[in-house]
């Protein structure tokens, strides 16, 4: 498994608008194509105006395939257009589990 760890820095005083647009337009497309969301957080301490979200994939190939399908969805372009200018920067990390880590079972 790999984790796609995304950190977006949102324009000051635009967090509410970003979250509303993501929930209404971005999240449905992401869930439809990317699978389960592992976490979605807003910073309270440290660098402010940041959103962090985590998505899990079986492999790099799985992630690339799912993202390609999402990117081809016209609803994704619609969401990106609506949110233009809200994101100032993005940092992406791909994480893999340490050899000794066993994820909790549901």
Image: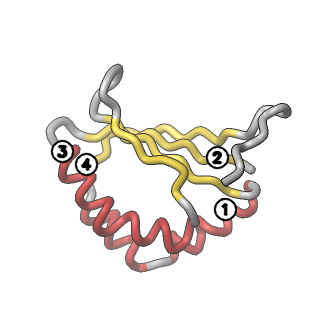
Q: In this view, does 2 lie above or below 48?
A: below
Q: What element carries label 1?
A: helix
Q: Are marks 4 and 3 in contact (CB under 8 Å)?
A: yes
Q: Name the residue under label 1.
A: 64
Q: Name the residue under label 2.
A: 3
Q: What element carries label 4?
A: loop
Q: How far apart are marks 2 and 1 (CA)?
A: 13 Å
Q: Is residue 83 above or below residue 52?
A: below
The quadrant where residue 93 appears: top right
Which is more N-terminal, label 2 or label 3?
2
Which residue is most to the top? 46
Residue 14 relative to residue 42: left or right: left
Which is more N-terminal, label 4 or label 2?
2
Residue 52 in percent (x, y) is at: 43, 41
Disc assigned to residue 14: 3
Disc assigned to residue 86: 4
Q: Are marks 1 and 3 in contact (CB under 8 Å)?
A: no
Q: Is mark 3 on a helix, strand or loop?
A: loop
Q: What element carries label 2?
A: strand
Q: Distance between the residues labelled 1 and 4?
A: 25 Å
- 10 Å neighbourhood of mark 1: few (<14), some, or many (≥20)? few
Which is more N-terminal, label 1 or label 2?
2
Which residue is most to the right? 99
């Amino acid at each position: 498994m790999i984790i796609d760890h995304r950190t977006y820095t949102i324009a000051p005083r635009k967090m509410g608008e970003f979250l509303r647009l993501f929930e209404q337009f971005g999240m449905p497309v992401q869930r439809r194509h990317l699978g389960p969301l592992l976490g979605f957080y807003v910073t309270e301490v440290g660098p402010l105006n940041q959103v962090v979200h985590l998505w899990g994939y079986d492999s790099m190939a799985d992630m690339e395939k799912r993202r390609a399908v999402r990117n081809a969805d016209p609803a994704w372009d619609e969401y990106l257009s609506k949110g233009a200018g809200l994101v100032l920067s993005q940092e992406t990390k791909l994480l893999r589990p340490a050899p000794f880590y066993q994820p909790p079972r549901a």
